Image (tube, rainbow, N blue to C red):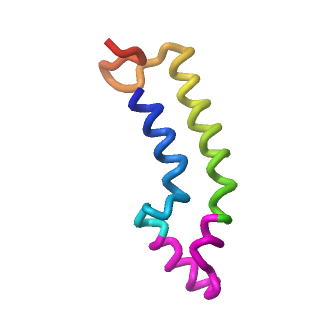
Amino acid sequence: IQAAHRIGDSVTQAVSPMHIFLYLVLTMARRYVPEMQLGTLVARLLPFVPAFAVVWIGILAVFFFADLPPGPGQTIYLP
């Protein structure tokens, strides 16, 4: 369950205006594209969200269906 939560959080965090690193990326992007605004940056990052979601959910599915442990001494199922 924690892995599923982390997948959902990490996928949407890249485009969340509450994420502090988004403003750091915006500041660095303005060096190369001075007219870059927050909306433009989010719009450019948005196509990565579904791609990351598919990849992360695929990795979680591999662990789940292959019954692989997500870490040392752990199981995929809750006790």
The location of residue 61, given as percent across then percent down, is 57, 24
Looking at the image, residue 2 sits to the left or right of residue 28; the answer is left
Residue at 56%, 37% (x, y): give it: 56
Residue 22 higher or lower than 6, as above or below:
below
Nearer the observer, 37 or 28 = 37
The residue depicted at 50 percent of the width and 79 percent of the height is: 27
Please state, as top left, top right, bottom left or bottom right, where the C terminus lies in the image.
Answer: top left
For residue 54, which quarter of the picture? top right
- In-image side of 61 versus 6 (left or right): right
Residue occupying the point 47% across, 72% down:
23
**Where is residue 51 shown, x and y percent of the image?**
67, 45
What's drawn in magenta, residue-wise? 23-42
Q: Assign the magenta stretch its main secondary structure.
A: helix
x and y, in percent, of residue 60 in the image = 53, 28
Give the position of the N terminus as an image quadrant.
top left
Q: Residue at x 41, y 25 (%)?
A: 70
**Relative side of 21 to 40, left or right:** left
**Number of numbered callouts drawn:** 0
Compared with 78, 9 (above or below) is below
Q: Quadrant of residue 78?
A: top left
Q: Is residue 3 magenta?
A: no
Q: Measured along the vertical axis of the image, is residue 49 above or below residue 30?
A: above
Instruction: Reply above or below: 34 against 73.
Output: below
Measured as percent of width and height from the top left, residue 7 is found at: 49, 39
